[in-house]
Amino acid sequence: MQAGTARKGARIVDRPEYASKFSPLTGRRNTTVSDAVAAMKARNYGCIVITDASDRVEGIVTERDIMFKLVAERRDPNRVTLAEIMTADIRMARETDNVLDWLRIMSNERFRRLPVVDSEGRLQALLTQGDFVSYTWPDLLYQAGGLAKATILGQLHYILTGLLALGLILVAALALS
């Protein structure tokens, strides 16, 4: 499923960080969990995206899937395949989708990894909630700075009045001494 596209600059592909994303780790349905975990460990990745021979996304296996669907059920990672524990019905974004739309969707629906696919459903990248936060962080800081500036300027007359009153009190105190 896909979120809507929006103004230029807010698209996933327009973020400068997007071009430098590492390639996602992929595997096939018949890969054993043991082999997948070894690959995840070697690259320090928290998930593996399941793709078909044409690189179309079929599902995802996360650390959580491994813990809940394999370890907790005491299944053998050398015999269980990714197809047996993968989450198949996953949300996927397009490169032209809006960054903030997906940050909101991921937060509301409580998932942390988002495959980005082309128009044919082929995997292009994998984004995490952390990626979206880092994408939006500079914008949030800019907005916070603008808000702080507006607040200070809006309160400037109170600040100046207070300073003037303090100055008059000091002058009066000096005159009396």
Image (tube, rainbow, N blue to C red):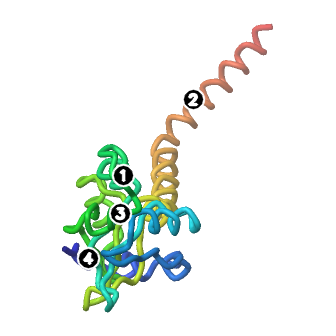
Ranked by sequence position, the earlier of labels 2 and 1 is 1
Find numbered disc 4 in the image and state the secondary structure of the residue it sits on: strand
From the image, state whether disc 3 or disc 2 is nearer to you: 3
Find numbered disc 1 in the image and state the secondary structure of the residue it sits on: helix
Q: Residues within 10 Å of mark 2 (few under 14, many from 20)?
A: few
Numbered label attached to residue 64: 1
Where does the N terminus fall, quadrant-wise? bottom left
Cα–Cα gap, marks 2 and 4: 65 Å
The amino acid type of the residue labelled 2 equals: Gly
Ranked by sequence position, the earlier of labels 2 and 4 is 4
Check disc 3 and report the residue beneath it.
79
User: Disc 2 vs disc 4: Cβ atoms closer than 8 Å?
Assistant: no
Numbered label attached to residue 13: none
From the image, state whether disc 1 or disc 3 is nearer to you: 3
**Residue 16: x, y in percent?**
52, 79
The amino acid type of the residue labelled 3 equals: Arg
The amino acid type of the residue labelled 4 equals: Glu
Cα–Cα gap, marks 3 and 2: 75 Å
Ranked by sequence position, the earlier of labels 3 and 2 is 3
User: Disc 4 vs disc 3: Cβ atoms closer than 8 Å?
Assistant: no
> Front-most of 53 and 120?
53
Check disc 2 and report the residue beneath it.
162
Find numbered disc 2 in the image and state the secondary structure of the residue it sits on: helix
Check disc 4 and report the residue beneath it.
58
